[in-house]
Image: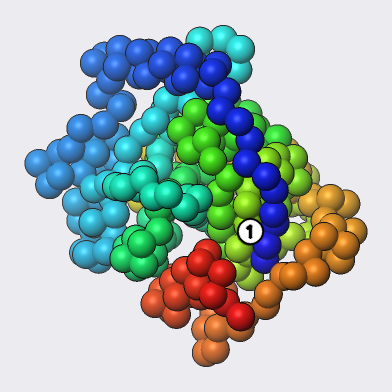
Amino acid sequence: MMWGSPPIPAQTRVATMAEKCESLSRVLACKTGGGGGGTGAGFPSFLPKEVEKIKDPFARTLAQRIERLPVQIGISESCIMSSCVKPIIQRETNPMVLLHCFDSSCLEWRCTYPLLEEAGLEVWAIDVLGWGFSDLERLPPCNAASKRHHLYQLWKSYIKRPMILVGPSLGAAVAVDFAVNYPEAVEKLVLINASVYGEGTGDLAKLPTIVAQGLVGRLHCLLPWWKDATINFIFSGGYNVISQIKQRLHCELQDAILRKVPDCGHLPHVQKPRYVAKLIADFARGDCH
């Protein structure tokens, strides 16, 4: 699905904020080791030790590339060390940013990510705030507005160009919500089995805490703040983007393109990565017709 917008001029304050965060991250890394550094197996030190038991070669390879970038989300000097996989080479074309499903991580793209790189794309895989492997020891709000603001600050500090934003399942709601609020940051949208017509988390937000804990429950889940961050999102009401897109889907996305992946379940980028990677790469290059 296409979402066009003109590029925005570079902002001089972006570099200043990023430099402050980078300086702080170096201090934090020295004190806590939270900023990265591989283990004996080549994995970042902030990943749960169970990562070394993973047998999937694609997961192991991508896990070794995960790093944390400092992202400033408030007016204070505090930063969130935010986990992602960065592109190795910056291309002349606009970058592609991969989001993930509900309560997942960038490892969801373990099979598709390398195929997109092989196709010559500049690819980021980003952990949505509250999930993945970011450092949330000082638990920030993890509601939809916070997730949106965090993604914008990361984009403004590091990506800085209109992106092709890819969202599967609930990640599609994250992508639509972000594009509606920051259209200057998004060139195109790719929505995979999009969960955008649900009214937030619905009755889940009314469940007792013990029941909500029972609904979520994998490598990133072993981080100490995972449970609190997920419950925080569930109780916040989640994403409700119907009011934002019910007119825009009809009025602004006349050029949207629908593709069906045959013989596949809910996560085609996991089950049929080569098929999906080709569809996404063709769309990025404008060859999907």
Query: In terms of depth relative to the viewer, which is nearer, 32 or 279?
Result: 279
Above or below, 79 against 77 in this view is: below
User: Residue 8's x, y, as percent?
Assistant: 63, 35
Residue for point 36% across, 45% down? 90
Side of 112 relative to 252 (left or right): left
Residue 32 visible, this angle: no
Seen as rendered, the residue at the extreme bottom is 263
Side of 153 relative to 22 (left or right): right
User: Residue 209's x, y, as percent?
Assistant: 65, 41
Side of 20 relative to 179 (left or right): left
Residue for point 29% across, 40% down? 47
Seen as rendered, the residue at the extreme left is 40
Residue for point 55% across, 16% down? 13
User: Residue 260's x, y, as percent?
Assistant: 61, 83
Above or below, 99 against 178 in this view is: below
Residue for point 41% across, 16% down? 19
Q: Residues within 10 Å of mark 1 (few under 14, many from 20)?
A: many
Which residue lies under the disc numbered 1? 189
The amino acid beneath tag 1 is: Leu
Q: Quadrant of residue 58?
A: bottom left
Q: Quadrant of residue 6?
A: top right
Quarter of the picture holding the N terminus: bottom right
